[in-house]
Amino acid sequence: MSAEMTETKPARNGVLYMRLADEILAYIRDNHIRSGERIPSERRLAEIFSTSRTSIREAVRVLQNKNILEVQIGNGMFVKSGLAEGTIHIELWKIDYMEILELKTLLEYSIIAQLCEYISPADLHAIEQSLVPLEKAYERGVFDQKADYRFHQRIRSCCRNLTLVQLLDNLVIKLDEYSRQMEIQWLAWYHTVPLHRELYEAIRDHDVERAHAAFYGIFEIDKRALEE
């Protein structure tokens, strides 16, 4: 390993633990740190990536759980012995969360347009029923994330294009896996609840423009929450 290591660019503001973990992996690769060798200290990594030691600690924990790093108390952090060169990668960490969210939004736009054209009374009733627990939580000053998921899942399930539904479901699963490592304030999502009612009513009234406006409002709040 070279005595003078290559500096990498500081991690962007708002970088989450999984992305920061990926930056550490890139650092290991760029500096040719091999299995069994020590990586810089927590303090030094915080300086390199212009972030807090707490964030570095969480990113290291992610890498420990993936059996990529080993932390030896008093000795430092080491690349796990036996890890094959070139195998260091983690699915989706190089993909920007915002880009995936935008893709999901575009696909859901298509479904909403279809439902505004035609939706059965039974499906419409099911969407409204899925909205009830979300609104009840809202009245208590709480955002019910599970109820929010069920509402959007119900809308997706009304689509006649099963391939599109499956694609969206897979995207949502991946986003959920990714977002578990993100520091998102639920209070921002709380303010999307009235827009869910607006979305439902627009679909009921076959008003695609109003439905898209409501859905875009939800997306914009999501986007701001992620950028904070």
Image: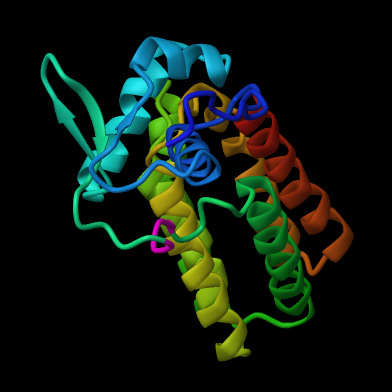
Give the main secondary structure of the magenta stretch: loop
Q: In x, y percent, where is residue 18?
A: 44, 40
> Which residue is depicted at the point 53% across and 59% down?
152
Residue closest to the far right = 209
Q: Is residue 28 left or right of residue 82?
A: right
Residue at position x 58%, y 89% from top? 163
Colour mode of the rendering: rainbow
Viewer-proximal residue among 77 and 192: 77
Q: Is residue 124 visible?
A: no
- The residue nearer to you, when weighing 110 against 37, is 37
Observer-nearest residue: 25 or 152?
Answer: 25
User: Residue 49 appears at what percent x and percent y?
Assistant: 56, 21
**Percent of width and height locating residue 31:** 51, 38
**In the rendered image, the vertical position of residue 101 relative to residue 53, given as above or below:** below
Where are the magenta residues, as a range? 86-90
- Where in the figure is residue 98, as x and y percent of width and height? 67, 46
Q: Is 12 within the magenta?
A: no
Q: Is residue 38 left or right of residue 133?
A: left
Q: Is residue 148 above or below residue 100?
A: above
